[in-house]
């Protein structure tokens, strides 16, 4: 349970940007597949930034909980897919 809370804590600062990107892409008429691929690329870029810069020191907390960087960003992508799917369903009912 602590690991799940830690995973969500890591994702929480990116939630606003995820929602904003989803709304913008959906309003431009992008398909759900295109949105998910763009999110995957953005999370890959974020992973690269974290692992290749001094930001990797933030991983110490998660490593102490037994969470690897791959698990952290994989869970972040899954959270992001759930949020994207929810927003897409909501926007489809209005658009």
Image: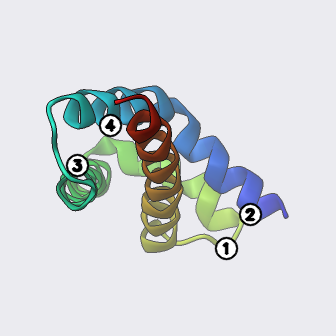
Q: Which mark is residue 3?
A: 2
| Viewer-nearest residue: 11 or 26 | 26
**Mark in the foreground, 3 or 2:** 3
**Mark in the foreground, 1 or 4:** 4
Q: How crowded is mark 3: few (under 14 residues within 10 Å), some or many (20 or more)?
A: some
Marks 1 and 4, how far apart at CA = 31 Å
Q: How crowded is mark 2: few (under 14 residues within 10 Å), some or many (20 or more)?
A: few
Where, by quadrant of the figure, is residue 48 drawn?
bottom left
Q: Is mark 4 on a helix, strand or loop?
A: helix
Marks 3 and 1, how far apart at CA = 25 Å
Q: Position of residue 26 (x, y in %)?
A: 26, 36
**Mark in the foreground, 2 or 1:** 2
Left or right of 78 in this view: 44: left
Q: Which mark is residue 42?
A: 3
Q: How crowded is mark 4: few (under 14 residues within 10 Å), some or many (20 or more)?
A: many
Q: Where is residue 20 in the image (x, y as percent from the top left)?
A: 35, 26
Q: In this view, does 47 lie above or below 65?
A: above
Left or right of 33 in this view: 77: right
* Residue at 27 percent of width and 55 percent of height: 32
Q: What element carries label 1?
A: loop
* Residue at 44 percent of width and 57 percent of height: 81
Which image quadrant: the N terminus?
Answer: bottom right
Q: Which mark is residue 66?
A: 1
Mark positioned earlier in the residue sequence (1 or 4): 4
Mark positioned earlier in the residue sequence (2 or 1): 2
Q: Is residue 81 above or below residue 28?
A: below
Q: Do the residues labelled 2 and 1 touch (CB within 8 Å)?
A: yes
């Amino acid at each position: 349970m602590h690991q799940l809370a830690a995973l969500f804590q890591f994702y929480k600062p990116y939630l606003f940007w995820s929602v904003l990107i989803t709304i913008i892409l959906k309003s431009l008429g992008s398909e759900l597949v295109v949105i998910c691929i763009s999110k995957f690329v953005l999370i890959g870029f974020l992973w690269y930034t974290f692992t290749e810069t001094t930001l990797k020191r933030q991983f110490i907390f998660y490593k102490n909980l037994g969470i690897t960087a791959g698990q952290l960003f994989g869970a972040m992508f899954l959270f992001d897919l759930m949020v994207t799917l929810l927003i897409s369903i909501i926007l489809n009912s209005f658009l």
